[in-house]
Image (cartoon, grey):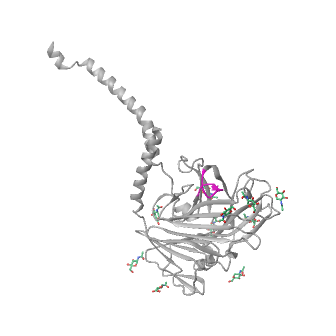
Amino acid sequence: MLFLTIKMYFSTLLFILSISVAYSQDRKITSILNPDCNACTDFDTLLYIRADGAHDSIHQVWDFTRRTPTVIFLISSLNLTLNVTWNSETPKFTFSEEPKYSFAIAIDKIYEYNDTEDNGHFDDRYPQRPYPLNDLLWIRQDLVQSNNEVKLIMRAHHLNDYQKGTIEIKLDLLPYQDYAVDLPHLIHTSNSTLIDVNLVNLTCSEDYQASRFALHFLLVSTDRKNDTMNYTMRKSLDDEHTPGVFEIVEIVTPASRRRGVGGFLQFRPVAYTQPQRGVSVSTSAHVSHFNRTELRNDSTLKTFYRHFDRDNVLVQDMVVSFGDAADGYYKQQNYTSWSFTVGHGTPPKEGFSLFVIMIISIGLGIPVTLALSSVVYLVVRKYKHRNPPTRLLNDE
Ligand SMILES: *[C@@H]1O[C@H](CO)[C@@H](O)[C@H](O)[C@H]1NC(C)=O
Ligand SMILES: *[C@@H]1O[C@H](CO)[C@@H](O)[C@H](O)[C@H]1NC(C)=O
Ligand SMILES: *[C@@H]1O[C@H](CO)[C@@H](O)[C@H](O)[C@H]1NC(C)=O
Ligand SMILES: *[C@@H]1O[C@H](CO)[C@@H](O)[C@H](O)[C@H]1NC(C)=O
Ligand SMILES: *[C@@H]1O[C@H](CO)[C@@H](O)[C@H](O)[C@H]1NC(C)=O
Ligand SMILES: *[C@@H]1O[C@H](CO)[C@@H](O)[C@H](O)[C@H]1NC(C)=O
Ligand SMILES: *[C@@H]1O[C@H](CO)[C@@H](O)[C@H](O)[C@H]1NC(C)=O
Ligand SMILES: *[C@@H]1O[C@H](CO)[C@@H](O)[C@H](O)[C@H]1NC(C)=O
Ligand SMILES: *[C@@H]1O[C@H](CO)[C@@H](O)[C@H](O)[C@H]1NC(C)=O
Ligand SMILES: *[C@@H]1O[C@H](CO)[C@@H](O)[C@H](O)[C@H]1NC(C)=O
C-alpha cells in the first residue's frame, strides 16, 4: 500500500517533470503535405518534414504516392534545401547541395505463409503468398502538423479481391526524448520517428490452415553496396517500461555501427493481438536474416537514390513475422499490432527512471545509513570513554 502510494506520488512528479521537459525541443520541425504539387488530391500523400538542430538538419519524407509505405531520412547541413517536383502525381527530388547521409525503409509486401512448424518464424520453405502493398489504395485517416508533433495515420482495405481486412500504419514524430505512451514504450527522440503497423481482420487463405502474416522490409542506406546492415539483440537492465520483455532489437546501417552517424531501427521483440495493448495479449516478433536485393524501377526509393553513386547505395531486405507456438495462428485473434522506431545516430538507451532510482536509493540507503550510524555511535562512545567531558571533570 505504501509502495503504491510512493509510486503514485512519483508518477505524478514524473508526469509534471515530463510536461516541463516536453516543450524543450531538441529540433525545430516544419512539415509540408505534398509540397508544390498541383495535381495532388486527397488520395496522394507525401509528407515532407524538416527538423533543424544546432548543427544539422534531418529531412524526412513519408511517402504513399506510389502506394508502398516509404520513410526516407536525409541528413544535411542546415543550408540544404530539398525540393519536390512532380510529374503528375509522381514525385522527384532535388537537393541544393550534397547531402551528408541518407537511409530509408519501405514495407513493400505482406507475406501470408503457412506456418507448418508452428513457431511464428517466417521461413522460405513454407508455402507463402506475397501481397504487394503498391496494389492497395491508401487513405489518409489522420494528419497532425504542429510545432511539437507530426503524425500521420494511413489505412488500406483488402489485400486483393478475395481477401478483406485493414492495414493501418501510424507515423509519429515527437521532437524530444521520451518513452512512447503505448506499450512497449519505445524511446523516441528528435532524431527518430515512431511507427506502428496494425494488421486487422485480414482474411486467411482457405488452404493455409496455419496462416500467419509477415512484413517484408526494404532497408536502404548510402553505404558501400557490398557492406551489410547489422542486427543485434541487446538485453536491457530492467523491464520497467515493457513488463516481461528484456530484449531490445537494433538494426543499424554500417555508418551507424562504425561512427554512430547512420540510421537505425529499434524495437522490442513483441507484438500485440488486441487493440488494447497489454502483457496478457502480447506475442513474439521475429526478424529474418538480411538479403541483398534491388529497388524496383517504379518506386520512390529508386527515384530518390538515383542522386547517389550506385556503388554507394546498400539495399537489403528482411522479414518480420509474428506469433508463438500453439497460439492458434493469426485467425485466433485476427489482429496483430507492432511498433518500431526508425532514426538517425546511435539507438537511444533506456535509463533507470526516477522511480527506480528512488527505490534503489532507499534500498541501499537504509542499510548504509544504519551501518554508518552504528559506526558513528561506536566511535563517539569510544571517544567519550577516553576523554570524559571536561564539565564532569571540573565537577569532581
Ligand atoms: C551555409 O551558407 C552560408 C551563407 O551562404 C555560408 O556562410 C556557410 O558557410 C554555409 N554553411 C555550410 C555548412 O555550408
Ligand atoms: C527549390 O525551390 C525554390 C523555390 O521554388 C527555388 O528558389 C530553389 O532554387 C529550388 N532549389 C532547387 C535545388 O531546386
Ligand atoms: C498448412 O499447414 C497445415 C498445418 O501444418 C497443413 O495441415 C496444411 O496441409 C498446410 N497447407 C498447405 C497448402 O501447405
Ligand atoms: C541527434 O543527432 C545528432 C547528430 O545529427 C546528435 O548530435 C544528437 O546527439 C542526436 N540526438 C539524440 C537524442 O540522439
Ligand atoms: C474487426 O472485426 C471485429 C469483429 O468482427 C470488429 O469488431 C472490428 O471493428 C473490426 N475492425 C476493423 C478495423 O474492421
Ligand atoms: C477471424 O476471422 C475468421 C474469418 O476470416 C473467422 O472465421 C474467425 O472466427 C475470426 N476469429 C475471431 C477470434 O474473431
Ligand atoms: C567492398 O568493396 C571495396 C572496394 O570496392 C573493398 O575495399 C571492401 O573491402 C569491400 N568490403 C567488403 C565488406 O567486402
Ligand atoms: C554487428 O555489430 C556487433 C557490434 O558492433 C558486432 O559484434 C557484430 O560482429 C556485427 N555483426 C555483423 C554481421 O557485422
Ligand atoms: C534470400 O536470398 C536467397 C537467394 O537469392 C533466396 O533464396 C531467399 O529466399 C532469400 N530470403 C529471404 C528471406 O528473402
Ligand atoms: C529498370 O531500368 C533499367 C534502366 O533504366 C533497365 O535496364 C531495367 O531492365 C529495369 N528493370 C526492370 C525490372 O524493369
> Is residue 198 at least partly visible in the picture?
yes
x and y percent of residue 377 in the render?
33, 25
Q: Nearer the viewer, residue 287 or 354?
A: 354
In the rendered image, residue 273 lying in the magenta stretch gets the answer yes
Which residue sits at x=42%, y=68%?
Answer: 53
**Residue 110 occupies which quadrant of the picture?**
bottom right
x and y percent of residue 201 in the render?
70, 63
x and y percent of residue 32 in the render?
49, 77
Of the four image quadrants, the one with ligand 3 is bottom right
Left or right side of 302 for 161: right
In the rendered image, residue 42 lying in the magenta stretch gets the answer no
**Residue 392 occupies which quadrant of the picture?**
top left
Region rendered in magenta: 267-278
Q: Report the number of discs.
A: 0
Which residue sits furthest left? 394
Q: Nearer the viewer, residue 394 or 315?
A: 394
Quarter placement of the C terminus: top left
Which residue sits at x=77%, y=71%?
Answer: 162
Left or right side of 81 for 184: right
Which residue sits at x=59%, y=60%?
Answer: 339
Which residue sits furthest top? 396
> Is residue 73 at least partly visible in the picture?
no
Q: Nearer the viewer, residue 173 or 161?
A: 161
Which residue sits at x=42%, y=46%?
Answer: 9
x and y percent of residue 288 in the render?
69, 59
Q: Looking at the magenta stretch, what is its main secondary structure?
A: loop
Instruction: Give the answer, above or below, for where 208 lies relative to 10.
Output: below
